[in-house]
Image (cartoon, helix red, strand yellow):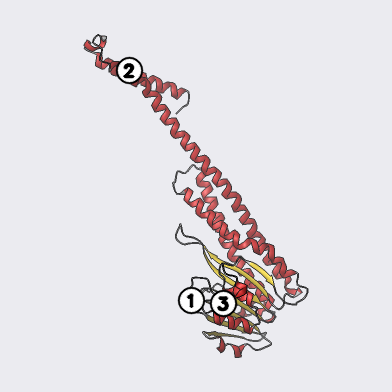
Amino acid sequence: MKNNLLSERLVYNGESHTPTHFHLCSYGPKACEETHADDFAELVPKLQPGQVHWLQVHGLKDTETVREVCSHFQIDFLTMQDVLNVGHPSKIEECETYNVVISKLSSLPEVAGDDIHQIHICLLQGKDFVLTFMEEENHFFQDVEQAIRGNILKVRERHSDFLLSVLLNSLVGNFVSVVSRIDDSLEELETSLFENDRDRDIGIQIRLLRKQYLLMKQTVYPLKDQYAKLFHQNTTLLIQKGNRAFFSDVNDHLLYVVQTIDSCRETLSSLMDLYISNNDLRMNDIMTRLTVVSTIFIPLTFLAGVWGMNFKWMPELDWRYGYLFAWGVMLLLGLVVYIYLKKKKWK
């Protein structure tokens, strides 16, 4: 791994080929203006003071354009690198003039057996702006756009910190949706195991759900530990006191996600134990059946071995009903052994 502190070159390490383009929403108490553009220079004249500017950047392929955007809003170089690093762990960081939130948008696969699809997302909030960087074209925040157009909850009369709280609430809502579906799938699988369902795919399903659980844990847990940073800002006014209640509400939702993830961990652990126990019981059942069959046929094999010996003076050889007698003895002996095992509840 190269030392990123020894290079001024920005590198996007994702796989998305979405061209870098913009959606700017500038609003104030009386009006809201939206602009779509492929060139950031077209948007610069619209970034007038006295308004809140929400700039959505879709596609991180063009690193120089990302640099241009960040430089305009005085974002430092290390944060630029974090924006372009799709493998960066989730974090919340407080800088001098802006706040940084890095996380993932997650969606469960439509086809069973596929992995969770995650999109790298970065939120930067300054005094009068919010930047959202996403590596793919995505309309996840469409409801927030509609709320700004309709001035729902007087959103246009509030500062950028309220917009950040709304975006974070949508992001945490995504966590709730995905984690709840994983939890539901685990409960359904647990029911199948308690019913001793012999579906051979259950082991594969457990491994898949465990992988999904681990991805969500890696995404959510760092935010849980760092979210409190947004409440303890003494040097800046990026989070106003009057809006902290909204951040507290988001924190409640985040804690619910963490609790659900913890519940998934416990359920997964019990599912693994139950799955192994069911396999052991199934193996014991198979061995019991094999033992019963062996126990029945051992005396029959003994008789067949005795009568199969080629001694000249064997009484039954010249007996007219010797063959039928042999069959009768063997059937009767097998039946007696079977009844005995049945009474002993071996089968």
Q: Which mark is residue 10?
A: 3
Tag in front: 3 or 1: 3
| Residue type marked 2 | Leu
- What residue is rendered at 57% in x and 69% in y? 2
Quick check: marks 3 and 1 in contact, CB under 8 Å?
A: no
- Graded by Cα atoms within 10 Å as few (under 14), some (14 to 19) or many (20 or more), the crowding at tag 1 reads some
Q: Quadrant of residue 307?
A: top left
- Residue that mark 2 sits on: 303
User: Would residue 253 be seen by someone viewing this image from the given angle?
Assistant: no
Residue at mark 1: 18
269 is higher (above) or lower (below) than 99: above
- Regarding mark 1 in the picture, which secondary structure is present there? loop
Q: Which numbered mark, 2 or 3, is in the foreground of this view?
A: 3
Quadrant holding the C terminus:
top left
Q: 156 left or right of 305?
A: right
Q: List x then y, in percent, for residue 110.
A: 46, 62
Q: Is residue 81 above or below residue 264?
A: below
Which of the marked residues, 3 or 1, is nearer the chain's N terminus? 3
Dot placed on the residue nearer the N-terminal end, 2 or 3: 3
Q: Amino acid at mark 1?
A: Thr
In the rendered image, the residue lying farthest to the right is 234
Write the residue at 60% across / 74% down: 81
Q: Amino acid at mark 3?
A: Leu
The quarter of the rendered structure image containing the N terminus is bottom right
Nearer-the-camera pick, 104 or 202: 104
User: Label 3 near label 2: C-beta < 8 Å?
Assistant: no
Spatial CA span between label 1 and label 2: 80 Å
Q: Residues within 10 Å of mark 2 (few under 14, many from 20)?
A: some
What separation in Å lies between label 2 and label 3 (alpha carbons)? 85 Å
Residue 77 visible to an observer of this rendering = yes
